[in-house]
Structures are given as C-alpha cells and as structure tokens.
Amino acid sequence: MRGKKQMSAALIVCLLAGIASGCAPASVQPKKQSIRIGVTLYDQYDTFVSQLVEYFDICAKEKGQETGIEINVVLYNAAGSQSAQNEQVGEMIEDGCDVICVNLVDRTEPTTIIDMAEKNNVPVIFFNRELVEEDLERWERLYYVGAKAFESGIMEGEIAAEVFLGDPAADKNGDGICQYMVLEGEAGHQDAIVRTEYAVSTMTENGVELEKIGYAIANWNRAQAQTKMAQMLGEHGNRIELVLANNDDMALGAIDALAAAEIPRADWPLIVGIDGTDVGLAAVESGEMAGTVYNDKEGQAEAMLELAYALSVEEDLEPLELENGKYIRMPYAKVWPEDVDDFRDGQ
Ligand code: BGC
C-alpha cells in the first residue's frame, strides 16, 4: 500500500535557513524557495549505503544553510523489492519531488522508473548500483553517481600482494603459493564481478602465485559471510592463507567465523576488504584486517547532493564536470593500518 514503506517523519529533513529571500542580490536569486529530493535505497540496512545516505542528509542540511533554500529529503527503503521501489518512485513523482535518487534494487530493471520519470519530466540520479550505459542513455535527464569498480579491485590486489610478499609467515605452508578464497557480493552487481577479477589479476601481475581454493557469494552481508566462512573453514581449515572480500562487511563476517571457531589469531589468514566503513576501519586499525580500500561515500554523497540541487533549481551542470554529461565517479584510496585516522571522517 502506498506510503507504507516510507520511513519515519524524522527522516524527512526540512531545512529552512531562515535567510530572507531579499538577502541575496537579484542576479543570483534562485528560482525556487524550496526543493524536494526523493531517495530510495535498495536496502536501508546495507552498511555502506546507509552511511552514504546519512552523509547525504548532512550535505543537504549544509547546502540549505548555505543557499537559504529549504531542502527536503524524503527517504524510502525498497527492502530488496524492485516492484516496491518502482511504486515508491511513482509516489515521489506524485509528491512533487524535483529530483529522485535511486539506489536500484535490480540494476538490470530500471525501465519502469525511467519511463515514469521521463513521462513526468523528473530527473533521476542513479547511485551505487550501476545500470548499463544503454539504459542511462535512454533519456537525457538520467545520471549516475558512483565509483570505478575496477580501481577498487586493483587496490585490493595491491594491498594483498604487498602484505603476502612482505610477510613470510603469511605463506602458512611455505609452498610459495598463496592459497586464497573470495567472498563475493551479489551475483550480477558491477562491483562484485569487477572487484574480484581485478584483485586477482593485480596480485598475479605483482608476482604472487595464486591457488584459488574456494569462493562464496555472501551478498555484501556480514552474517552470510560468517556462515560461508565457517563452511570454508570446515572444508579447508588452516589451508586458507588469504580472504579477498568484495566489501568490509563480508571481511568482518570472515573474522566473526574465525573468532567463533576459536582459531588463534596467529593462524588467521590475511583478510582484505573494500569500503572503509566505520566498522571496517576499526578492524584495519586493530590488525584483524590487513587493509581496506576506501569507497568514498562522503564524496559520492556530496556529488549527488550538488547534482540533485543543480537539477532542482535548474542551475548549470557545467561546474560539476560530468563524464559524458552523465557520470560522476569518485576515486578510491588504499587504507593501511597507519592511515586509518585520516579516513575516519571521510577523506
Ligand atoms: C559497496 C558494498 C555495498 C554495495 C551495495 C558496494 O559499492 O562496496 O559495501 O554493499 O555497494 O550496492
């Protein structure tokens, strides 16, 4: 039923800076006094996505204060259902949203959303879950904000190679080969496919001989990763020398499994993740994870807010330097234990 999935009114951010419209010179007067930005998440409990959207709210507050425009952010949780998300977008359009930010449930199914948006002339910013270029090309007012997945894979591979080659104890059986396993995100997600491929090829290019002893899909999820890692430990035990996780939550799931199995820390495999979420950074700092790759949620949130704002008040998009007029992709960064403090509050 309509409105059911809408999150609490507390999440509707209404910002009124109280700066009278007469304060700014007439030439820079924005056309609107208030804007409404709709946001729908594939899953509000995803650690990375929820932290990104938390920061988006902060950016909206700041932008509201800076511009004197009331910025309303209306947040919905699609809870893993594409049809629910389609309905939410319909509702946001009816509610008069100036722009809609969509974290697609199914990145291969954006058609309904695109059609509704075009019909009602409401621009859409897709983020984090990348649709194929052909879909983004279907209408001129469609955009994407995210990152270059391959970059994170390369950086994860570089971290893993450097640690493995630099620490003879990491090669537990001393055979000169790195026995590794992969914890993968959702099947079909651009970041899962590409991160795994590049992490592995980068390790090889960096001179590490690899033997894959297993992989498991754990859907970005800590609890699922713990279960899968426990199974792997049952099958391969102390043979696992490296866990390449597609994100920090799954790396943490692997750690949970090692801890639950009471395996002494000295016998743990190397574990590398991607994201630099708060919990991920804490695990890098404590040495449980060898390192992670920072997925710049603050940069992505800020870019998305700037784009949403510009689209809402019909400002020139030129200063935002969109790639092909449609894409904003923030760079990743490697995080070693000694760098953690630099990343705690964003880059
Ligand atoms: C992040 C994951 C997250 C996923 C959700 C990825 O970019 O690294 O942590 O679960 O996006 O779509």
Image (cartoon, helix red, strand yellow):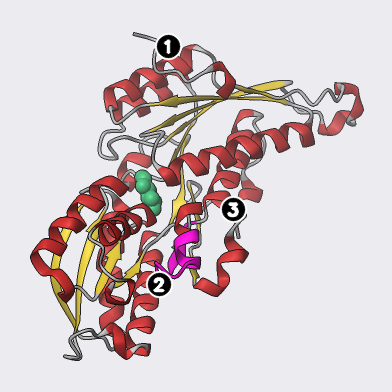
Q: Nearer the viewer, mark 2 or mark 1?
A: 2
Amino acid on which the number 1 mark rests in the picture: Gly
Residue ID for mark 2: 290
In this rendering, the answer to whether 294 lies above or below 306 is below
> Mark 2: few, some, or many residues within 10 Å (few <14, many ≥20)?
many
Spot occupied by residue 302 in the image (x, y as percentages of width and height): 60, 45
Image quadrant holding the N terminus, namely: top left
Residue 261 picture quarter: bottom left
Q: Looking at the picture, how far across and down is residue 334, in whole percent? A: 48, 70
For image coordinates 20% across by 67% down, the residue present is 181
Q: Amino acid at mark 3?
A: Glu
Residue under the image location 60 percent in, 60 percent down? 347
User: Which stretch did the figure color magenta?
Assistant: 282-295
User: Which of the 4 quarters of the picture holds residue 151?
Assistant: bottom left
Identified by mark 2, the residue type is: Ala
Q: Nearer the viewer, residue 158 or 342?
A: 342
Above or below, 95 against 201 in this view is above
**Residue 212 shown left or right of residue 324 in the figure:** left
Which badge, 2 or 1, is on the more N-terminal residue? 1
Is 160 left or right of 49, judged from the image as shown?
A: left
Q: Nearer the viewer, residue 160 or 297?
A: 160
The tag earlier along the polypeptide, 3 or 2, is 2
Nearer to me, 259 or 125: 259
**Residue at which label 3 appears:** 321
The residue mark sitting in front, 3 or 2, is: 2
Marks 3 and 2: CB-CB under 8 Å? no
